[in-house]
Image (cartoon, rainbow, N blue to C red):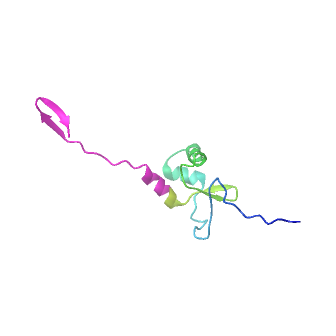
Amino acid sequence: MTATCQQRPHHQGERLDSTSKSADMLTVEQAAQRLGTQVRFIRRLVAERRIRFYKVGKYVRFHPDDLTAYIEQGRVEAIHPVLTYQKGTHAYV
C-alpha cells in the first residue's frame, strides 16, 4: 500500500517558483560580493533566517530585490542636531 505525501514547504527557505528566474538569482558568493561582505557573513544570515533566500535543490540562492530589501531594513536615517547656545551652555535641539 502506498501513501501519497504532500510536499511541505522546507523550513530552510522558500522554494523557487516560476515567477523568479533562476538566471536572475545570485549565489552565496555573489550575494557576499554585492553586500561587500565575506561569504561567512551571508551564510550566518541564512542560518539565523535574517535574510530572505531560496532553495534550489541543495543550493541557496538570493533574488537581487531581496538583497536590496535587506539593505533597506538596515537603513538608519540621519539626524541633524542643531547646536544652540542657551544660558552659557551649548545644547543640541
User: Does 23 appear above or below 43?
Assistant: below
Q: Position of residue 61 (x, y in %)?
A: 60, 57
Q: Residue at x 64, y 53 (%)?
A: 12
Is 58 part of what is drawn in magenta?
no
Which span of residues is magenta-colored?
A: 67-93
Residue 72 located left or right of residue 80: right
In which quadrant of the rendered image does the C terminus lie? top left
Residue 59 located left or right of residue 20: right
Is 87 part of what is drawn in magenta?
yes
Residue found farthest to the top: 88
User: Does 9 appear above or below 83?
Assistant: below
Residue 29 located left or right of residue 7: left
Displayed quadrant of residue 30: bottom right
Q: Position of residue 4 (x, y in %)?
A: 79, 66
Q: Position of residue 79 (x, y in %)?
A: 28, 45
Q: Residue at x 69, y 60 (%)?
A: 8
Q: Position of residue 77 (x, y in %)?
A: 33, 49
